[in-house]
């Protein structure tokens, strides 16, 4: 029998699952109203509009709905987002747009692209747990600053940045 754990990447050996996903397991109790996972109340779901849109697309073009889509995403969705942003004078094309299934997926992709092991990631305290979870896979060092009454403590963040630039830690 093959011992697959020996073949896992080093950072995956430490991985114990997404904390937010574990939290969701407690949400099956209808008496719990949790704000932990950012779940909206089902009372705000526009079920009739969603049902009508689903029925229309399934009756008009079920073959396309059931197929895989292009890797960059559905062109109609990309065009709709680009058109929507133009209303706010934001101009981009499909090469400057990436649609993710969640904010945490976007953070995960950004972390994979920009964070190296040992890099410092500055965060507010408290911060979005999903960001910490997404970035943790890249093995950064987190440094936090307590938030100010009006939001991010930019002066506190600046102090950390100046301190790190004047006394960087060299892990090599």
Image: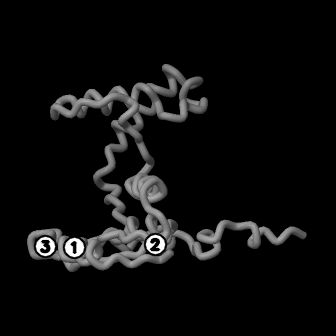
* Disc 1 to disc 3: CB gap under 8 Å: no
Tell me the distance, in whole angstroms, between the alpha carbons under discs 2 and 1.
18 Å
Q: Quadrant of residue 12?
A: bottom right
Marks 2 and 1, the one that precedes in the sequence = 2
Residue sitting at 26 percent across and 76 percent down? 166
Q: Nearer the viewer, mark 2 or mark 1?
A: 1
On the image, the x and y values in percent for residue 154 come to 15, 69
Q: What residue is pinned by disc 3?
A: 155
Q: Nearer the viewer, residue 150 or 156?
A: 156
Q: Nearer the viewer, residue 28 or 151?
A: 151
Question: Dot 2: few (<14), some (14–19), or many (≥20) neighbours within 10 Å?
Answer: some
Tell me the distance, in whole angstroms, between the alpha carbons under discs 2 and 3.
24 Å
Q: Quadrant of residue 159?
A: bottom left
Q: Which mark is residue 118?
A: 2
Marks 1 and 3, the one that precedes in the sequence = 3
Q: Secondary structure at mark 2?
A: loop
Q: Secondary structure at mark 1?
A: helix
Marks 2 and 3, the one that precedes in the sequence = 2
On the image, the x and y values in percent for residue 60 come to 49, 20
On the image, the x and y values in percent for residue 145 come to 23, 78
Tell me the distance, in whole angstroms, between the alpha carbons under discs 1 and 3.
10 Å
Q: Which mark is residue 162?
A: 1
Residue sitting at 22 percent across and 73 percent down? 162
Residue sitting at 64 percent across and 71 percent down? 10
């Amino acid at each position: 029998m093959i011992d697959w754990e020996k073949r896992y990447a080093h950072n995956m050996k430490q991985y114990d699952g997404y904390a937010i996903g574990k939290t969701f397991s407690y949400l099956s109790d209808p008496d719990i109203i949790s704000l932990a996972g950012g779940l909206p109340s089902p009372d705000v779901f526009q079920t009739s509009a969603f049902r009508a849109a689903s029925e229309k697309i399934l009756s008009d073009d079920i073959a396309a709905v059931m197929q895989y889509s292009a890797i960059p995403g559905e062109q109609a969705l990309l065009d709709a987002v680009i058109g929507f942003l133009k209303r706010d004078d934001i101009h981009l094309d499909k090469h400057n747009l990436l649609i993710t299934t969640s904010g945490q997926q976007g953070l995960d992709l950004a972390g994979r692209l920009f964070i190296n092991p040992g890099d410092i990631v500055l965060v507010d305290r408290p911060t979005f747990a999903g960001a910490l979870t997404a970035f943790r896979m890249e093995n950064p060092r987190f440094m936090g600053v307590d938030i100010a009454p009006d939001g991010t403590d930019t002066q506190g963040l600046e102090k950390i940045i100046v301190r790190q630039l004047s006394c960087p830690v060299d892990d090599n």
